[in-house]
Amino acid sequence: IRITHCTHSYYLIVLDSARSNMQFQEDSRICAFISQRTVFMNSIQPATLVVIDEKIQEILYDTSEDVVRYLSQKYPGIVFNDYGSLVLMPGIVDSHVHVNEPGRTEWEGFHTATQAAAAGGVTTIADMPLNSIPPTTTLDNLKIKAREAYAKTFVDVAFWGGVIPGNQHELRSLIDAGIVGFKCFLCPSGVDEFPHVSVDDVKKTILELLSTKTVLAFHAEFERDEKMNLLKGTYEYNTFKFLRKSIFLYCIFLDDPGSYDTFLHTRPDIMELDAVKLICDWCIKYDFRCHIVHLSSAECLALIKDAKTRGAPLTVETCYHYLVLAAEEIPAGFTEFKCCPPIRKNSNREQLWHGVKNGTLDMIVSDHSPCVPELKTSGNFLTAWGGISSLQFGLPLIWTAAKMRGIPFFDVSKLLSSQPAKLCGLEDRKGDLSVGKDADFVIWDPEESIKIEADDIYHKNKMKFHTIVLTTLLLATMIAAYPQKDGQIFSNEAIRQAQNTYLIPKDATIQKVQEGIELAAYESIPGDQRINLFEILGEHVPPEVVNNLQTQIDQIGRN
């Protein structure tokens, strides 16, 4: 528990998620991490990282005994952690995760999702605004979600806001409250409470947000029906409607709904192409930050590259499953592999990797989107829920594929950590190993192999899983320099001790964050637990500070 003096006249308890093993003894607050393969932004080299109070305080590009002696004299009681030749890399930042809590906690929740994250070396997640009920489309809804996350998380958590028709007046308050950006859909989202936006809605949203530094993320599939509505009554429109209805009926009545090809035909590349072209045009016209989520179609790469060349402030992500799976490999009836946009053919996968290597694609994320088994395992690709649960396995999946293509450690780290952190406005704290950043690390062995079995999965609703062998053995996840996953099964004690961080971009308005989010967590604590909390604080801080804190917090609660 940290006591932080805020811009207001009171002290505020900041509850930092996943700093679960924090102790107040002097020797546990200063430690050193040593590795012969430490991953920096553009290199991998021997280094010793000194961590004080959860932050990287000093970096020495040396691992010799001289360094140990020097640091022992400079920091009496320092604890050394020598990982030898294991890779020490920045903790992964996954900017695209559907936690689904509250409202659909039978699908997933903060406790299980963040446990899976920590087990996979992910130290920060950004929760998407939909699939929870209510969706994160208003400040009040954001407060509800923050309350639900309280004391349940093993890793740090940030939140996206959502754009739906008619909520443009809510967006500024969400920015002030510290959301990392906004997401919208250009086609139906799959859940009624998060309707997709029209072209006019997007234009209104951009104009509303134009003077801010926020980012608007798009599910970039555009229904041809939306486009053809502009041509109603014309020959082209009537022909299109006839052909679309014919194709749909063919898929239902003549084609096999258990065949992956049947589903693939319903989500053609043109849906992504149309959407990406629109987004690129908006990005250039308004000079406004736009982000394309989960790009699947490699046919869009030329459009994206051209827009970036013309100066568009555009970023694009793809996902683990698009880079490691191919349509030809998906067996009939295995609806566990359904997602939207779809996994495409092997040739498309290789073109996506080319886009990763040449910088057209900026980052790789999970788009973790679980659901209950009855919605996922029907065997019918036309009716099953679209979403893949891969939050825990991004590092081994991507490293196994990346090393075969000659991609070095530091580029993998950029794709998984620094670029997603920058997208979310968290680059001042997360994403790379530099002085002043959070001491969030993943320690792993890139030469060892692991087998993924169903029993190894920590997220809720473990899907049917054939054994997969991957190159990468993850040994430890360190958040604020304290272990969350260290060859051990997670304990109930760890989560009882866990503390929550609501992460905010560096440009957020602090006052709104305090009033809108951090106090929401306080309000959710029963009264007797609040008293116990202050008794604990009294052991570690001066009585006058505790008394002042008690008085101010009680006043806040009344307000």
Image (spheres, grey):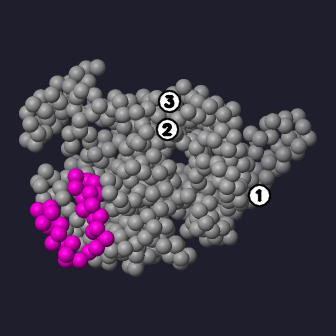
Name the residue carrying label 1. Answer: 254
Residue at the location (70% across, 55% down)?
306
Viewer-closest of 490 and 209? 209
> Separation of disc 2 and disc 3 at Cα?
10 Å
**Residue, disc 2:** 161
Question: What label sits on residue 311 in the rendered view?
Answer: none
Name which of mark 1 and mark 2 comes first in the sequence.
Answer: 2
Task: Estimate the x, y position of residue 179 in percent, counting from the top left.
Answer: 45, 39
Inter-mark Cα distance, 1 to 2: 41 Å
The answer to the question of whether label 1 and label 2 lie on touching residues, with beta carbons closer than 8 A, is no
Amino acid at the residue labelled 2: Gly
Q: Quadrant of the C terminus?
A: top left
| Residue denoted by label 3 | 172
* Residue 193 appears in the picture as rendered: no
Q: Secondary structure at mark 3?
A: helix
The residue located at (43%, 70%) in the rendering is 43
Where, quadrant-wise, is the N terminus in this rendering? Answer: top left
Q: Secondary structure at mark 1?
A: loop
At horizontal 58% and vertical 52% (from top left) the residue drawn is 315
Residue 556's place in the image compared with 331, above or below, is above
Q: Outermost residue toward the bottom?
A: 447
Residue 67 lies within the magenta run: yes
Q: Is residue 85 visible?
A: yes
| Front disc: 2 or 3 | 3
- Mark 3 or mark 1: which comes first in sequence? 3
Residue span colored magenta: 47-76
Gap between marks 3 and 1, in whole Å?
Answer: 50 Å
- Judged from this view, the residue extending furthest toward the top is 559
